[in-house]
Image: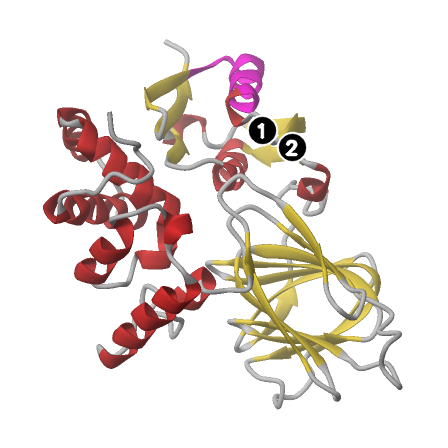
Amino acid sequence: MPNSDAQALDPAVVDQAIHWLVRLRFNPADEQTRSIFEHWLQQRPEHLLAWQRVEALGDDFAGVPPDLVRHTLKGPRAGMHRRQSLKLLGVLATLGGATWLGRNYTPLPAMLAQQHSRTGERKRLQLDDGSLLQLNSDSAVDSYFNAQRRLVVLRRGEIIVNTGADAGSAQPRPLWLQTRDGFIRTLDARFLVHERDDGTVLAVQTGAVTVFPGSNQSPVQDIVLAANQRLFTSKGVRELKDDGLDLWSWSDGVISARNMRLGDFIQALSRYRPGVLRCAEEVSDLRVSGTFQLADTDRVLALVAQSLHLQIDYRTQYWVTLSAAS
């Protein structure tokens, strides 16, 4: 039997998997749509394999033409060398680039980033200046240092930054962090940054950071001190509403909630497992409190379901729904 990691796939099957990824992620799926998807998934083993590969690549290829994706998916993701990736990026550029669901944002650089984490993986790394980075699930960063400044670029996801002392420099250089919504600058701080659909979350644990929405040439909008958090876009900065999630808990390998809406909790948990994870509308306003280990998301679902008297519907490993117990 061929190794599933190296098995080539029929381009038509890959196209179908891409179609389902976009349809399920970015459009409301009714019962008929889910039923058709499940039927397609179970028709042939190649369908499940194609879905697993496309789901693993996720948003990296959501805006890339299918023929480019087919070329990459013929083998395992890890087998694609950086030079091949750059060639793919060059071809994409000649086609006019890709958009991020209407936003002026190209997803492909996240795939080419110097450091990245897979879905469900959390990673720690140290930069040359002594700064420590923690990458949350499905995140990607680049770093660029010169004599004047230190720059970290968040390509996707969420990171925690412990600013290094920059002892090797004649004088401490400011550390800049760039997101799609703007820039952050600090000399000495521990802070968290998370890119969301509605903007970029910034939380500061120690020290202070300065926020420049849009570009590093824009006027300063806010100086955020320790124990404070904000949400900013390219247009400005505002207070971040507390939804009950402990923003820092993932760095300890847990998800911690306090009186959090079930719908919001499930959305947060879904970042740590591939596929579709959802709850029925009639139970979405139930409240969740507790601290749960991220290493076993199935166990988390079981505990939440038991606490709230819910049932879990595993249509497949990649499609899970919580609903009211019958």
Q: Which residues are magenta?
A: 299-311
From the viewer's perspective, tell me whether residue 183 is left or right of residue 119: right
Residue 234 % position (x, y):
53, 76
Nearest the viewer among 232 and 172 is: 172
Residue 297 visible in the displayed image: yes
Query: What amino acid is found at the position of numbered circle 2 in the picture?
Result: Asn
For disc 2, the marked residue is 259
For disc 1, the marked residue is 287
Say which element carries label 2: strand
The residue positioned 24% from the left and 80% from the top of the image is 94
Quarter occupied by residue 317: top left
Quarter occupied by residue 33: top left
Quarter occupied by residue 67: bottom left
Say which element carries label 1: strand
Furthest toward the left, the residue is: 12
The residue positioned 73% from the left and 83% from the top of the image is 149
In this picture, is 192 found above or below 188? above
Could you give the CA–CA distance between mark 1 and mark 2, rounded to whole angstroms? 5 Å
Which numbered disc, 1 or 2, marks the residue that appears first in the sequence? 2
From the viewer's perspective, tell me whether residue 125 is left or right of residue 7: right
Nearest the viewer among 70 and 6 is: 6
